[in-house]
Amino acid sequence: MIIVKKYGGTSVETPEKILKIAEKISSSKDEGNEVVVVVSAMGKTTNYLIDLLHKVNPYPNPREYDMIVSTGEQISIALLASALSKLGKRAISLTGFQAGIDTDSTHARAKLKRVYRGKIRTLLDEGKIPVVAGFQGMSPSGEITTLGRGGSDTTAVALAYALDADVCEIYTDVDGVYAADPRYVENPKHIDKISYDEMIEMAAHGAKVLHLRSVELARRYKVPLVVKHAHRDGKETRIEGINSMEEPLVRALSIDENIVKVVVERVPDKPGIAAKIFEKMASNQLALDMIVQSMHKDGKNDVAFTVPSQDFQETMNVLDKIKAEVEAQNIHFDENIAKISIIGVNILGSSEIIYEMFSAIASVGANIDMISSSNSRISCLVPKNKIKEVAQAVAKKFDLVENAS
Ligand code: ADP
Ligand code: ASP
Ligand code: MG
């Protein structure tokens, strides 16, 4: 089998953990597999590097951001390759560039353009174990780029596709995908198998167990994805296939605290205003969500939406520039919000499910701010300080917690 194995930050946070992982990779190779490893920066290294950069410049040039954050993964690949060679394996560390990962030029959130299989294929043919730096690539002009936080998962899936691998295994600090993030909900149910579409909704709305783009790529190219614990054998989650059920069913909930609500207040109620507001955001590739327009009686509208916290500053810069042009009275923002989403099959087809979600949120005295929905998801903004209580209540309501036995 050709297997791509990706190890996340917490799985490689100490030299001891790196040595343990090297043993597992080595055994998989001894079983006759061709193994390619993708690895993230150790523990919280990426956060540390970003903080360091912000100490010298709070608004760094994105090129320099990529230059510094990409170093985290370079430490891990050299350590893991060295641990593997201590075990007698021929392992070769490769940066994104050396591995043939080409991206566009959008620093800090680059998109993959092409992944060349040649170099890695040759190393595999020579019986070696390529150890590739996750999250990084190279732009057309030869600059180092990164794929956005959590992007090593996407590197792994892209390599799995390029090499026509049998499976892409994502090793992390949980033994699979749960019906809710265990940091918010006590004792959530384990999910053994989930469709690409459901996993995409979960990842798009805060479940950072998998990088959104990794699941999108896996769906497009039908790469079988498995999530496992890096240091414990046992349960796992397979992400594959499509949904075959029709019955409305809530499968999971996701939480996103890293968003900010922005309101462009009292713009004229006339054609072209919304287009103008969103034109510049689109050209800056800002990831907007939950767009709502509310009408006043005096010919004015409020246009509200959410942006990921990391895009907030850039969004405000754009809005400051167009505020006069769209005749907005004020730009208001709120960071004390969090989004809870329920994800499943044909959810909107069931008014019962909608009612139950709202009543669970009300049961802990939380006020609902914005609401958005799709056929497979309902999302509500609630106050940040209530999010744990809300998550617990919603999880209970939809039977997403393990019954005490
Ligand atoms: P890694 O460093 O291995 O990439 P991440 O921190 O990116 O790990 O992802 C693993 C984390 O994702 C878990 O520790 C868990 O808190 C979080 N998570 C969020 N939603 C879920 C979910 N539905 N199921 C499992 N883990 C989840
Ligand atoms: N090290 C990067 C991050 O922390 C990429 C990753 O872990 O996937 O975001
Ligand atoms: Mg991750």
Image (cartoon, helix red, strand yellow):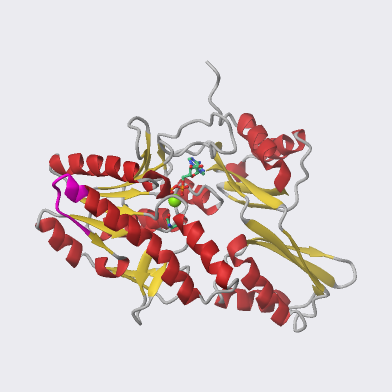
Name the spot of residue 30 as percent of width and height, x first: 13, 41
User: Which corner quadrant of the image does residue 18 belong to?
Assistant: top left
Pinpoint residue 62: horizontal percent, then vertical percent.
Answer: 50, 74
Residue at the spot 32% in from the left edge and 60% down from the top edge: 158
Q: Is residue 236 left or right of residue 293?
A: left
Q: Position of residue 316 (x, y in %)?
A: 68, 72
Farthest residue in the right direction? 298
When asked about the image quadrant of residue 216, the answer is bottom left
The span shown in magenta is 84-92
| Position of residue 113 in the picture relative to residue 317 (left or right) | left
Q: Residue at x 37, y 45 (%)?
A: 14
Which one is nearer the viewer's eye here, 264 or 300? 264
Residue 147 part of the magenta-drawn span: no
The residue furthest top is 405
Decide if residue 165 is in sight here. Answer: no
81 relative to 303 in the view: left or right? left
Query: Could you tell me which residue is drawn at 29 percent across and 57 percent down?
Result: 77
Q: Is residue 346 visible?
A: yes
Question: Residue 126: horizontal and vertical position, in percent?
Answer: 9, 57
The one nearer the camera, 126 or 226, is: 126
| Image quadrant in which you'd find residue 27 | top left
Residue 372 vs 279, above or below: the answer is above
Relative to residue 331, is residue 399 drawn left or right? left
